[in-house]
Amino acid sequence: MITQLLSSIAQGVGLTLYVTAASLVIGGLIGLVLVGAARSPVAIIRGIATLYINIVRVIPPITWLFLIYFGLPQFALKLTTIQAAIIGFSIIASAFMAEIYRSGLLSIPDGQREAAHALGLSAVTTVGHIITPQAFRVALPAIATYGIGLLKDSALASTIGVREITYYAQQSAKQTHEGLLSFVVAGVLYIAISLVVALIARRVDLTLRRKIGVA
Amino acid sequence: MGLSFGTKAPPTALSGEVVVSGLGKSYGAARVLSDVNLSMNEGEVVSIIGPSGAGKSTFLRCLNYLEIPTEGEISIGGAHVVAGGKLPDKASLDHLRRVTGMVFQSFNLFPHLTVMENITLPQRKVLGSSKEQAEEVANKLLKQVGLPDKAKAYPARLSGGQQQRIAIARALALSPKVMLFDEPTSALDPEIGLEVLAVMRDLADEGMTMLVVTHEMHFARDVSNRIMVMGNGGVLEIGPSEQVMSEPQNERTRQFLKAVLDR
């Protein structure tokens, strides 16, 4: 029974990973733009970025999904369920990632920028070679934690019909009447994926820490 | 209040490797630096001493625009900037930073780069040196500061004194004309500070033009040609080291020296 359930629910692993990873990458890139905009010398750009980050974060993920999946077609924008889920989660991830980057940037002592300036390094070199690598190192644990959070949130995509883990668990529960076991299997799959992500992140973090020392 | 930035030679009567005239800085109504004048010849070493809050570091940091002066003029090694309360044009700023090297109290090495990368990255980005050229320069400088075997180490693995010597090497790698030292030994215990002072002494002997904010009175007296005493945002007095130490003219200088020498 369990192997049957497992093999049917595990069909959702691919889409769970796909939606999570795609949203994290797209959201992570938009987040970079946002954190740049939030530090812009132009007040209006700063204002818009800050407003975006704050509004996005207070709307629940499921509301975002419905807004996009049921709302956008009214503007003749027809989306597949997977597209809608990725767009929704990318928007949410972008705001959270921007905040994570921001805390990473704040953790870098002024002396690093001053040294770069005194050496005459250009702004591009300073950001690219001095600030970003250090900020990333500081932000890495938070990014991993957020990635795992996003993995769990991706279960919400089942509500608009994305065939990920929770979707298949619901189907199995209906068909086999093994509700408890179906969702236990789903839970175990989430735990397994989270563990792998956490282990990789920890490994990278330790390697960087060993090299660079404590911070 | 006209702003004129340029890299042309300054139209001042003073001449020298470093010419600072009428340098001042205010934050609104608060005046942190006023009317600082200094002229230095090539190869000269000037120590800046004085109580904390005197504006010593602010003055030094104005010279490469880590702080923005609001008035006065700066000429260093052919770079010339007229202060106007904002950053000068990019060419002048780059020029000014190109001819100055700075060493900080807190070292400020880049912790994610090895010692070698700390010294080669600026050379490659600022001077356009090849990897091989940059490493050759770095190895020579590492030998000069007495740390030839630390090229592959990360800064966190080094003692404070070693980090500061690497920071000196990093600044020297860009062949600055003037070195600015901002309390280079204040974060080090006295014994460790000596190894940094030894490197600075060698540098002075080789003819480097140096401006050193310091609390090391022995260094100020023995190594520098002149001592500039600052207090309350201005220059209290400036003169040959021996004279300032033994016969200070200014009452506030006398007080300060008594406090630091009688301990």
Image (cartoon, coloured by chain):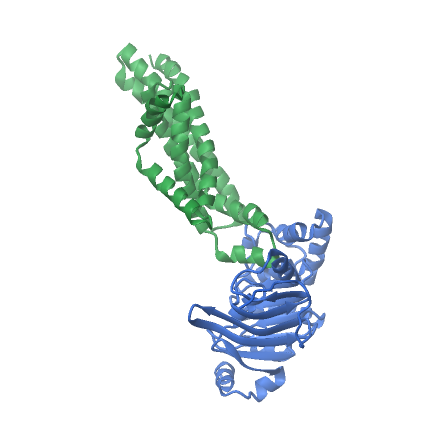
Q: Position of residue B199 (x, y in %)?
A: 65, 67
Above or below A128: residue B215: below
Relative to A27, B243 lies left or right = right
Q: Which of these two is toward me, A7 or B75?
A: B75
Q: Which chain is blue?
A: B
Q: Position of residue B174 (x, y in %)?
A: 67, 58
Q: Residue furthest front?
A: B2
Q: Which of these two is toward me, A133 or A160?
A: A160
Q: Which of these two is toward me, A105 or B109?
A: A105
Q: Which chain is green?
A: A
Quarter of image, res B208: bottom right
Label count reads: 0
Relative to A43, A183 lies left or right = left
Quarter of image, res A12: top left
Residue placed at 52% from the left, 61% from the top?
A: B86
Residue placed at 47% from the left, 69% from the top?
A: B26
Residue placed at 63% from the left, 79% from the top?
A: B226
Q: Position of residue B43 (x, y in %)?
A: 70, 72
Above or below B257: residue B157: above
Above or below B167: residue B209: below
User: Is any atom of residue B158 visible in this view?
Assistant: no
Q: Position of residue B90 (x, y in %)?
A: 60, 56
Q: Residue furthest top?
A: A175
